[in-house]
Image (cartoon, grey):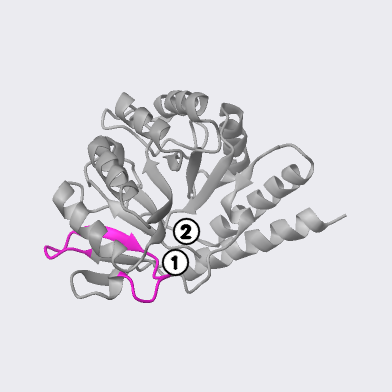
Amino acid sequence: MLETYVLHITKECNMQCIYCYEKDKTSTYTWDELKTLLNNIIKHNRNFNLEFLGGEPCLRTDLIKETVNYLESIENLNVDNYIITTNGTIINDELIDLMKKYQKIKYAISMDGNTIMNCLRILKTGFNSHDLVVSNAKKMLSIFGSDRISSHMVTHHYNIGYFNDGIKHLYDIGLRHFGIGTIENTMTIDNDYCQTFIKQHEILSHKIKNGEYEGIHIGLFEGVKPKSDERYYVRDESGKVILETYGRVDNDIKNTDKYKTQPASSPIGNMIYNIREKVYYNHKRIMLSG
């Protein structure tokens, strides 16, 4: 599996999601810092995906632009995809122009479904971000189409029971690519959540088999990351997280002495892996059934 490097470009954010796991909400990054990091990455790996993460990365569209332009200027380097993982509240002409210039840039919106499901994703004004994000999603879809605009849904105790309502809502907006996540550190996940997660995905599998969602792509239905796919945090000399890597390349940046690297720990990692694996095999079974 191709390595995906997750580049942190700001920890600042314009939202205050109730379930946010990020403790560092103030760190900023300079182009010189990022360029040094990128140069160290490409010493060891010339073919990878790059994801931009925050905070809210679209607060620093300038750094996204610098990064993409720089990497695309390097000979014999192949970045398959650039993924901007965003809360979807910020779009501007600079970002749109950059995406028009480079077809490999994708815009991945974090939105948890319909208004009720999204109620923990709030702006600093205290309002649910849902309506603003839907408006921006429709605009981006109208410009770039559904292959380049995707949605990441965070599920937890308070919204998993509405999962299929959320999928229909986002599908009706025009989204076709969905990643499904689970709260890991800031809320309690128990057996009831796990069983509901599995059951809701079974319902969706049957709907897809019956032809209700033409062209839909659910990440969990298309593959499960191997258990050995462990995420690592890469920190600079000050201890600030500057990158995440999944350890798919034996001799890449995580094994150098320049940066401090540590595995990311999840208190419920095995539980999450087990339910995701169950969903994947249930979907295969349902699609193959008579």
Q: Which residue is mark 2?
A: 189
Task: Name the one closer to the observer, 288 or 186.
Answer: 288
* Residue 126 spot, x, y in % from top left: 30, 30
Instruction: Report the span colored magenta.
Output: 235-252
The disc labelled 1 sits on which kind of residue? Ile
Q: CA distance from mark 2 to mark 1?
A: 8 Å
Quadrant position of residue 65 = top left
Q: Are marks 2 and 1 in contact (CB under 8 Å)?
A: yes
Quadrant position of residue 283 = bottom right
Q: Which residue is mark 1?
A: 268
Mark in front: 2 vs 1? 1
Residue 55 seen in this snapshot: no
What residue is drawn where x is 52% and y is 48%?
A: 179
The disc labelled 2 sits on which kind of residue? Ile
* Left or right: 194 in relation to 123: right
* Left or right: 55 in relation to 231: left
